[in-house]
Amino acid sequence: MANRLTWKIVRDAIHQQILDGTLMAGDKLPRDEDIARDMGCARSTVQRAMQDLSDSGILERRRKGGTRVRAEPVTRATLDIPVIRNEVENSGRKYGYHLIRREVATPPPSVLAGLGLGSSARLLRVEALHLADNRPFVFEDRWVSIDTVPEIMDIDLSRENANEWLVHNRPWSRCDLRVYAEKADARIAEVMEIPVGEALLVIDRTTWAGLKPITTVGATTAPGYQLLTQI
Amino acid sequence: MANRLTWKIVRDAIHQQILDGTLMAGDKLPRDEDIARDMGCARSTVQRAMQDLSDSGILERRRKGGTRVRAEPVTRATLDIPVIRNEVENSGRKYGYHLIRREVATPPPSVLAGLGLGSSARLLRVEALHLADNRPFVFEDRWVSIDTVPEIMDIDLSRENANEWLVHNRPWSRCDLRVYAEKADARIAEVMEIPVGEALLVIDRTTWAGLKPITTVGATTAPGYQLLTQI
DNA sequence: TGACAAAATAAGTATGTACATAATAGTTTT
DNA sequence: AAAACTATTATGTACATACTTATTTTGTCA
């Protein structure tokens, strides 16, 4: 009931001081306690606000060192990479899935290194195509650790999608992501039904459960695909 | 001193239940209060842990509805896009900058629409090349709102980098990012000293201060450029 | 039966207090 | 003067408590 300050109000007030130039890059802010006294709220409210600004990369906070406006600004964005089926269906299109290859093999050294495995490890390789309205949407080239996920061998991957099965049955605790552009080679061009040489966005993802590698996937997206974030 | 539970311990305990299958996608968790009682800590400690898991996209929380394991998992990653100079110098290379074009013009409709401006607005256009060890690293094609940032007209952009000037002098409150792949056209190929048709990663960014648009930039990166995140 | 109001619920927030921790500044010892 | 303690400081965390808010469930009335 009372006209208390919320941490979001405090956060926006501080942010506003940065936006209007009252606080510039590198400037030091007063102690949380003083800000709390000046604004008339509890220190924990200021702490919450500061934590949020710090998480967004706007402020830098150090014990004893105090709080300052980040001197080397970064654009910090949150990227949500959904399960492909959801991505397709949420955009109102029909999802389709098609298994291309399934085999047990020894992956190339780069894949083994990325997973932190020795040179003789044998993994399950899965190539599959995800469709949106019957058109190729994402081609995935995946290696799954049979050692970490033995159950995957019993799954009928022509009916069930490895991506979804893993995400529902083997949650990860660590994930490496890399995003880059690549020219479509003959193979990709054929599978995706596009001209050779087309520029495609590729999302590589490697996940672990604890220290054990689960899977590494290269997801080659159709032409025109965009990753979006909004802050 | 006492053996109190920290919110990180609580968070990891919950997360562990998800990792080991005790909690599956879609499952409902007990109320914070009950978890706190069971684990022997304050509800605020549980709240802090839950907030973190919710921010990471692992849990979904709704007032009255309770907490459940996210049914449609997403990979949520935080992307830090630094100022290019810092990115180059932090990797131990020499940073260079070169202004290619500076003019006042009316941008194409797509740019105007992205900025939410009418069809007659005149903006400052800046084309510039960022170098790493004297080799092209990022080509930027930028439009700056003269209305929002009139001071930009007085800056000598052949000496001072628009990217850095803006980021230090015009903090934004909202930012849209989009990442995609594009084939190098003749112009880009010449500027970047690469073959025509090379697949390049492009990062488009548009920023606002409140409702007023500041700038929109297309940053075309050199071949091999990767966006990385690690969770 | 359906529409609408009231109650119940669980997360979200605010506060004061106490203590923990990391980083710095100052002081003493070698 | 370098190294090794010590004190100080500002943020970080934990907790008990009280109140707020969004949402669902329930109850009432037409």
Image (cartoon, coloured by chain):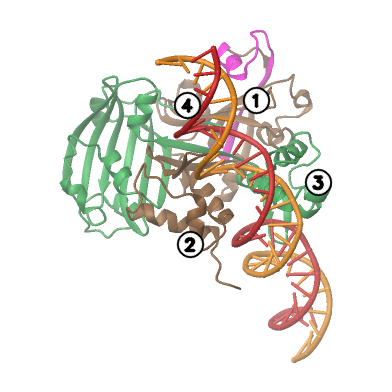
Chain colours: A brown, B green, C red, D orange
Discs 2 and 1 lie in a common subunit: yes
The span from disc 3 to disc 4 (Cα, nearest Å) is 58 Å
Q: Quadrant of residue C5?
A: bottom right
Depth-wise, is mark 3 or mark 2 nearer the camera? 2
Secondary element at image label 3: loop
User: In front here: A4 or A195?
Assistant: A4
State the CA–CA distance, disc 2 to disc 1. 50 Å
Q: Nearer the viewer, residue B40 or B116?
A: B40
Residue at mark 4 to residue at mark 2: CA–CA distance: 61 Å
- Viewer-proximal residue, A213 or B196? A213
The type of residue carrying mark 3 is: Gly
Q: Which residue is mark 1?
A: A215
Q: Chain of mark 4?
A: A
Q: Are marks 4 and 2 on the same chain?
A: yes
Left or right of A200? Residue B213 is: left
SS label for mark 4:
helix
Q: Which residues are magenta?
A: A109-136
Q: Residue at x 81, y 44 (%)?
A: B39
Seen in the picture, residue B31 relative to A65 is either above or below; the reply is below
Q: Quadrant of residue B20?
A: top right
For marks 1 and 4, the one nearer the N-term is: 4
Q: Chain of mark 3?
A: B
**Label 1, label 4: how far apart the Cα atoms are:** 25 Å
Mark 2 secondary-structure assignment: helix
Count residues near mark 4 (Cα–Cα under 10 Å), then give few for <14, some for 14-19, many for 20+: some
Q: Which residue is mark 3?
A: B40
Q: What's the mark number on residue A189?
A: 4
| Cα–Cα gap, marks 3 and 2 | 35 Å
